[in-house]
């Protein structure tokens, strides 16, 4: 059942992305559902047939656009624009006379004395019960879709979401905080690279929103700024070490089970490589083989920019569903679990795993040298995985990725030459605004390590940070710590 | 397409077409649409079995007329008069209620729940179950089981609801033209 439900949802959502519905203009939603209503109206009809004796002439059903007058001979008049002349005891109309084999005998205007007719027949077409049912379902679906379009994360997402302007000045989703921290016991720190932030002035504004039916408890949200090395970038490892690097080098070869995947992983452009989950084993792994040419003659690392599909979301919600009424008590009890017991709460993450990076060893075997990948289907996370081994100078470097089938969306894979460790400058917010007004209380709790900012659905804060001199020369990261509570949708 | 998706779409297809398969044996386009039924003057399509001595015969064709004791029908090749007492079972269809279109709409409705995010867990089954029920209901709209119906009830669906006219011979009657029926 679990697999079939997941399979159905996955099939319906293969081409769906969390913010896709929001990107579709609302008039398109309206058109789609108006079209659906129109289709229902057009196809689900019934015919209500009634017969009348000539003596019932005065009660003939007016709504019927046509009248059939059956004669004793087997002939039948089919009249349109008909009317009853009660005084004359006749029917007047325009149409045709058909013989018993329904061949046309005559056409034109006819006046039929009622007593010349054996039986009158009316047929009224109306909406069927199925039409009513379908209309109700269209209405329900449209209403839910409208709610989802107005507040997408109430339907599609979770976690605190962070919006920062990109190079064009457009505010875009660049980070999601502590996605797997669904209980106080799972409070965690999360570092996300603001890979598309291009600050041109020292004041950086970050919007943090609660767009889901959740309570977010944000302990802190700091910006980490690191000066880029000349001609290079700065990336962070999964362990939280910041490394200066050279400019990323795209792979020359990308080979996945479905074929060439080079176009999808070459640039950080939102075009992602992903696959379908296995139909019988959600934990089944797949491999992607990469090759890099012109590898710099220094220590190198693999940059992975990825996010998850909805598989983890589905499994977490399904697990909560299985807990039923016990879910709240179970989550509350998680705070008093032992370390081992608490570790078991991460079993989904362990079973599904991260994106493993493998290199060939001297014996020709693929060995794991690192892994990256953060929980969450919304914002892509960027990490660098240092490669402990490397090919002889001048030879292409072959790298294999091993990942759970259907779990990961890879936006970019690149090779970088690794420089030294660099220390970021931690910057706490210097102002917090809500609905355009200063909110000193929110600022106070965000900078006090013993306090936390608690947000509810619909909350929207603007955090302002003061970046170092020459902000355009800095790489920016967002460090958020906290947890969130599901409202058990 | 992987196995899971094949199963999903097979289920949807069965749900969508379930009503059609339980429908009628009428040739394609023999049955008028609801709008055409307002102006056409042919009988319903009948498919029934009847006793012939110790054996059972089956007849498919157009329903011509019914009286207190007999039923008349014609096919492309012959006419048949059957006493009510010999009628074993049968079903008639008198217009094309387009259950397939309703099933298709239900399929599209199921797909449209992609716009409902996590709530498609509720709305997709609603469409699958409700859509199948609607398609079934739509198919039943145009169908009648013949055996529980009395002569006057059956006459509603005959070419001659007033009864077989005097002077009209069954052998002279032709079923709704094949070309007209789109075959």
Image: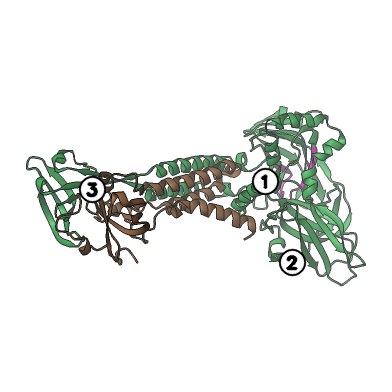
Asked if marks 1 and 2 touch (Cβ < 8 Å), the reply is: no
Horizontal side of A403 relative to A488 (left or right) equals: right
Near-viewer residue (A473 or B68): B68
Q: CA distance from mark 3 to mark 1?
A: 53 Å
Q: Residue at x 75, y 31 (%)?
A: A330
Q: What colour-coding does the image apply? A: by chain
Chain A colour as displayed: green
Position in image of residue B116 (x %, y %)? 56, 44
Q: Which chain is brown?
A: B
- Crowding at dot 2, Cα within 10 Å, few <14 / some 14-19 / many 20+, comes out as some
Of the numbered discs 2 and 3, the one sitting upstream in the chain is 3
Indicate the quadrant where residue B62 lies: bottom left
Q: Nearer the viewer, mark 2 or mark 3?
A: 3
Q: Which residue is mark 1?
A: A2
| Same chain, labels 2 and 3 | yes
Is residue A201 within the magenta segment?
A: yes
Residue A113 versus residue A320 in the image, above or below: below
Q: Residue furthest top?
A: A441
Q: Which residue is mark 2?
A: A255
Horizontal side of B57 relative to A315 (left or right) equals: left
Q: Which residue is mark 3?
A: A65
Q: Secondary structure at mark 3?
A: loop
Q: Nearer the viewer, mark 1 or mark 2?
A: 1
């Amino acid at each position: 059942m679990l697999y079939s439900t997941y399979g159905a949802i996955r099939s319906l959502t293969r081409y769906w992305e969390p913010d896709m519905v929001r990107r579709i203009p609302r008039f398109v939603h309206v058109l789609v559902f108006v079209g659906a209503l129109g289709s229902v109206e057009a196809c689900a009809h019934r015919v209500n047939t009634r017969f009348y004796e000539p003596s019932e002439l005065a009660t003939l059903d007016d709504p019927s656009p046509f009248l059939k007058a059956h004669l004793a001979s087997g002939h039948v008049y089919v009249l349109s624009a008909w009317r009853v002349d009660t005084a004359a005891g006749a029917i007047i109309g325009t149409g045709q006379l058909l013989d018993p084999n329904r061949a046309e005998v005559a056409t034109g205007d006819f006046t039929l004395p009622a007593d010349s007719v054996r039986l009158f027949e009316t047929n009224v077409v109306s909406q069927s019960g199925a039409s009513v049912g379908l209309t109700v379902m269209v209405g329900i679906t449209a209403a839910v879709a409208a709610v989802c379009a107005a507040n997408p994360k109430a339907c599609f997402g979770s976690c605190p979401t962070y919006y920062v302007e990109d190079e064009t000045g457009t505010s875009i989703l660049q980070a999601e905080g502590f996605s797997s921290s669904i209980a106080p016991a799972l409070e965690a720190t999360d570092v996300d690279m603001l890979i598309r932030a291009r600050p041109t002035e020292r004041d950086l504004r970050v919007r943090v929103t609660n767009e889901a039916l959740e309570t977010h408890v944000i302990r802190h949200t700091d910006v980490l700024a690191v000066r880029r090395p000349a001609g290079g970038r700065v990336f962070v490892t999964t362990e939280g070490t910041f490394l200066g690097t050279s400019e990323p080098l795209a792979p020359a070869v990308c080979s996945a089970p479905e074929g060439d995947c080079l176009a999808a992983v070459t640039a950080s452009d939102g075009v992602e490589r992903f696959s379908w989950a296995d139909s019988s084993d959600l934990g089944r792994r797949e491999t992607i083989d990469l090759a890099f040419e012109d590898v710099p003659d220094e220590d190198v690392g693999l940059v992975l920019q990825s996010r998850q599909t909805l598989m983890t979301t589905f499994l977490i919600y399904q697990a909560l569903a299985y807990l039923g009424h016990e879910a709240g008590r179970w989550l509350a009890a998680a705070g008093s679990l032992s370390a081992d017991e608490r570790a078991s709460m991460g079993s989904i993450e362990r079973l599904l795993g991260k994106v493993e990076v493998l290199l060939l060893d001297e014996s020709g075997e693929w060995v794991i040298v690192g892994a990256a990948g953060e929980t969450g289907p919304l914002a892509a996370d960027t990490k660098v995985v240092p490669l402990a081994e490397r090919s002889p100078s001048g030879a292409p470097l072959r790298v294999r990725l091993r990942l759970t089938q259907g779990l990961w969306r890879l936006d970019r894979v690149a090779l970088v030459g690794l420089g030294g460790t660099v220390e970021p400058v931690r910057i706490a917010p210097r102002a917090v605004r809500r609905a355009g007004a200063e909110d000193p209380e929110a600022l106070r709790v965000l900078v006090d390590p013993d306090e936390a900012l608690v947000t509810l659905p619909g909350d929207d804060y603007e955090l302002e940070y003061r970046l170092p001199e020459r902000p355009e020369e800095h790489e920016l990261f967002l460090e958020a710590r906290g947890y969130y509570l599901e409202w058990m949708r | 397409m992987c196995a899971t998706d094949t199963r999903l779409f097979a289920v949807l297809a069965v749900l969508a077409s379930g009503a059609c398969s339980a429908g009628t044996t009428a040739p394609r386009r023999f049955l008028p649409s609801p709008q055409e039924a307002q102006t056409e003057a042919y009988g319903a399509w009948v498919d029934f079995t009847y006793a012939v001595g110790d054996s059972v015969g089956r007849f498919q064709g157009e329903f011509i007329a019914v009286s207190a004791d007999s039923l008349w029908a014609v096919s492309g090749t012959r006419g048949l008069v059957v006493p009510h007492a010999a009628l074993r079972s049968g079903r008639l269809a008198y217009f094309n209620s387009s259950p397939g279109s309703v099933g298709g709409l239900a399929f599209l409705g199921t797909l449209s729940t992609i716009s409902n995010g996590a709530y498609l867990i509720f709305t997709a089954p609603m469409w699958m179950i409700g859509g199948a029920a609607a398609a079934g209901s739509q198919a039943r709209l145009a169908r009648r089981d013949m055996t529980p119906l009395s002569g006057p009830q059956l006459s509603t669906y005959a070419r001659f609801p007033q009864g077989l006219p005097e002077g009209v011979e069954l052998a002279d009657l032709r079923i709704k033209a094949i070309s007209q029926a789109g075959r």
